Image (spheres, rainbow, N blue to C red):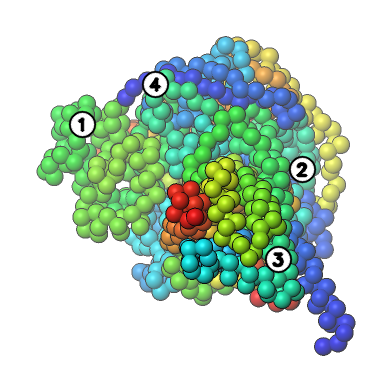
Amino acid sequence: MGRKDVIALMNDIITTACKFVTSSIGRKILVALTGACLLLFLVGHLAGNMTIYGGDVAAGGTSWIDYYATGLHSMPGWLLWSIRLGLLAVGLVHIVLALVLKYENYNARTHYQKEGTLKATLSSRTMVVTGIMILCFMVFHIWTFAVCGDPHNCYQVIVTAFQQPWCSIVYLVALCCLFMHVRHGVQSVLQTLGLSTRKVRPLYNIVGILFGLAVCGCLASIPVCVMLGILK
Amino acid sequence: MANLNLTLKVWRQENAQAQGRIETYKAKNIPDEASFLEMLDIVNEELVHEGKEPIHFDHDCREGICGMCSLTINGVPHGGKKVTTCQLHMRQFKDGDTIWIEPFRAAAFPLLRDLVVDRTALDKIIAAGGFVDVRTGAAPNANNMPVRKKTADAAFDAAACIGCGACVASCKNSAAMLFTSAKAAHLNLLPQGQPEKNKRVLAMVRQMDALGFGNCTNLYECEAACPKGISVDNIAKLNRDYMIACAAEAVGVYS
Amino acid sequence: MKEIKFPVSDYMPDSCIPEGPIAEKWTKYKREAKLINPNNRRKYTVLIVGTGLAGGSAAATLAELGYNVKCFCYQDSPRRAHSIAAQGGVNAAHNYQNDGDSVYRLFYDTVKGGDFRAREANVYRLAEVSCNIINQCVAQGVPFGREYGGLLDNRSFGGSQLKRTFYSRGQTGQQLLLGCYQAMEKEIGKGHIEMFPRTEMMDLVVVDGHAKGIVVRDMVTGEIKSYAGDTVLLATGGYGRVFFLSTNAMGCNVGAACACWKKGAYFANPCFTQIHPTCIPVKGDYQSKLTLMSESLRNDGRIWVPKSREVAAKIRRGEMKPSEVAENDRDYYLERKYPSFGNLAPRDISSRAAKEACDDERGVANTGRGVFLDFKDAIDRMGKEWIDGQYGNLFEMYEEITDVDPHEQPMMIYPASHYTMGGLWVDYNLMSSIPGLHVLGEANFSDHGANRLGASALMQGLSDGYFVIPATLPTYLTTQKPGTITTAAPEFIEAEEAVKARIQKIMDVKGTKTPDEIHRELGKLVWEDVGMGRTKESLMDAIEKIPAIREDFWANVKVVGSTEGMNQELEKAWRVAAFLDFAEVLCYDALNREESCGAHFRLEHQLADGEAKRDDANFAYVACWEYKGTGELPVLHKEPLTFDTVHLAIRSYK
């Protein structure tokens, strides 16, 4: 294989890739794949957060969540930043492509005077809305915990924050949005990736709901427990 | 048998350029055995007698197979009873009901008059690749190529699409994915369609995109509105086939 | 009673049937036919009107061959032509069932089914190419029903004792049409066909005695335009909507065929109109069309009416459910009268038997015009699932329309106008009496004689389009220098002006009756007088009343709106006007044909047991009617029918 052949092949691949990312299905697939990555991140993040139930230093034990947080921060800088930038890139692709699709969809449609819906769920119709709410929340979330928070005193930062009712309410609202987004997202990812059939689709739907409930429920348990005084 | 009195809220628009509006009509003494289009015939006959222009709507076979009739009834194409508008019967409505009747709306379906829209965009998707390129006379004996019954049945299920465009009209994104995917699946499933499978998938999807249809976001509204029970399995299949076709195109495999 | 004496002409154009034994005629024809060099084909423009199975398949095939094709249809897409509504299947002599089928047998059944009023040579050719049709469709990806071994399945159909019908569940027509529509779209995509949807043919343009163009109305803008070509192919279907209520689509009309008739094409055997036995009965006056339930249902359904009028009356009043009628009180009249064919007796016989039962006041449905089609025995024997596998969508369709579940209660059916065997006269080349005007599919008269067998219409449409016209078209085209006529010719301008004037005349009436009201009036009259049983009195009655309705139309029709832009009332009025001009020749033909044959049943001519009494000595001919002016008597030309291969016999299905 000569140099020219390699260039020709690269050329073909780039041409197809361009066609792929400008096609409806291609962009959907990218949104689905990035969505799947974000779901995986969510699971990891959740696992980390659950360490909060390991207890506090003040209560006599070792704070697991502080271990977890300092552990994350003690990763080599390049690795930490690769993960951060990678996540950022995934998130950006997900958001930008989803917004482009939405913009096109808006232009493709002329509206009815009387709208009717047969089957489409509320969560499926509000993906962009819940998505944007989650994005706003993420900014807030990263600001309060990651930027302003002290990884060596993570437990206390969390508990102090959630002891303010407005903060807990913001989190709970955001988690509702996340639930709606994930509930449609899970089965939508599988459908877009072509892994869905009439037989398994109802199952995917249930899995989506259970997954959303589990993730959002666990995450929501933290502010709830703080407000109930279980976590102090 | 009973007779119904209804209030109709109908979209009226003289032509493509004119400003459209909803107008209200009374439909009096409609036999509940009449079909929806026969109800409109009755209303139109009265309008003509009053010297007014009748409501224009598309229709032809009136037996649910040609796909010409359209109408979005109370916000749902074909009224959402798993049949075409021509097979929708007035017994589905109650005396005193108000019924909203609008055209199949989508930017890719320009309105021509009142409830009549131009759906030639769907034909263009077929022209791009929705066929098996076989010249008349070149066909081998029909039984030379056995097809597994299940495959043939699945291909038939996809081929049952009547091309009415309800999937586009019902889609919150005005996507034509159910139509395109069903048409592609019909041929992609059969052995006869294999030689052109990748080419077909790429051509049809690219044409669909170029025509200004929206993008599927898996709302499944299309499947619910489809009068012929076309499954969104076809969409999953098209997504799959498209990925494979793109990969094949990139590395130059055409099989 | 007034006597009508039809002017008869001795002149008859040559039917161009090749010499030789029947089995070799088509081969011989193809061997000797003229050819056009591929490079020259593109110089010829072929205008095709109608995109059903005949027009669509012709358009696709001719474009593949390299001709420059322009195709017109009134629907919004070529895929919607009414061929799409055919449910049951398509015949072919493949003999995949090993039950003794052959080209000869399909030919024989078709000639016999047509009650010996079809042209032998054409029918044989039809049977010959039938297998190619199936091969072609399968290659296109038409999903025919298959057996578990992966090979094609067949079912049986009325008028045949073997299984030769290929099917795609209950929507064979749609699948076949999609096959040829896709082939067409392929050629449209390649730029070989220019497609004009929502365009209605208004007139034929004849230049120096040759059909060289058409005048059309753009149904969106209202513009009148014309197109010139080297030949015109008419594939515009039948005239069944002359009865107003029929199983045809709402847009089906005789306009194009009638325009050609007026320009000199002979109309052949218009009285051969088929009444389909299995339609859903009429409900009320507002009804716009009748829905056909596939004849294939008769494979497993048993047709009956109550033996006694009292029971029938009770059912009509809703006092008794049909399932409550005891076995002994049921009259399975087809099984009783025709033991060997039973419920699968041909269409005309089944229709007439239903009418007789209802005339005997044993009919059901609220109007008394209905008989039962009962699946109870089949469900008991084969199980509900099997039945649903065979007829699922038909059962659903029936339930949607009538709100009755045919698993629980028998279906109610009644005959309705369905197909017209008559049509424009064509020779073996499918060319009409106007040189250059070819007529395909239901629009021509050639293959079905006095009665069409089930699953033969799809076969004929596709045969004409895929295989016959591509072979016969060069015979005409090679006599013509391509592209000599343009729309600048005075004949085009004249024809356009005439169309505009007629439209304006309709608009100017400004009367009080909608086109539909007048059409309904005409339909009622023609159905009563020229429907299933015809008599001299009834025909004379119709002949007397039709001109009055026509006058009423031109004095009282009300078309609102303008000639510009979309105007569906104007479309309807234009078509009704054509039906009114055409209806008389249907009656004249029925009156002239003093015999009963196939679908044409004259009550004066029946055998002692009520069967049709043919008069081969005097009527073994194609009656071709030449237009001489509206309201004037048409001139009768006769093409004698000779039966060299099949012996004329009394058609018996007992």
Could you give the CA–CA distance between mark 2 and mark 1, rounded to whole angstroms?
58 Å
Disc number lying in front (3 or 4): 3
| Mark 4, residue position | B95
What amino acid is labelled 4 in the image? Answer: Asp
Numbered badge on residue C212: 2
* Other residues around mark 2 within 10 Å, as few (<14) / some (14–19) / many (≥20): many
Dot 1 lies on which element?
helix
Instruction: Assign the N terminus of chain C to one quadrant of the image.
Output: top left
Dot 4 lies on which element?
loop
Give the image location of residue B216, x and y in percent. 61, 52
Dot 3 lies on which element?
helix
Could you give the CA–CA distance between mark 1 and mark 4, rounded to whole angstroms?
28 Å
Could you give the CA–CA distance between mark 2 and mark 3, rounded to whole angstroms?
74 Å
**Chain for mark 2?**
C
Q: Is residue A101 left or right of residue C148?
A: right
- Residue A23, relative to residue A174: is it above or below? below
Give the image location of residue C451, x and y in percent. 43, 46
- Residue C645, relative to residue C114: is it above or below? below
Numbered badge on residue A84: 3
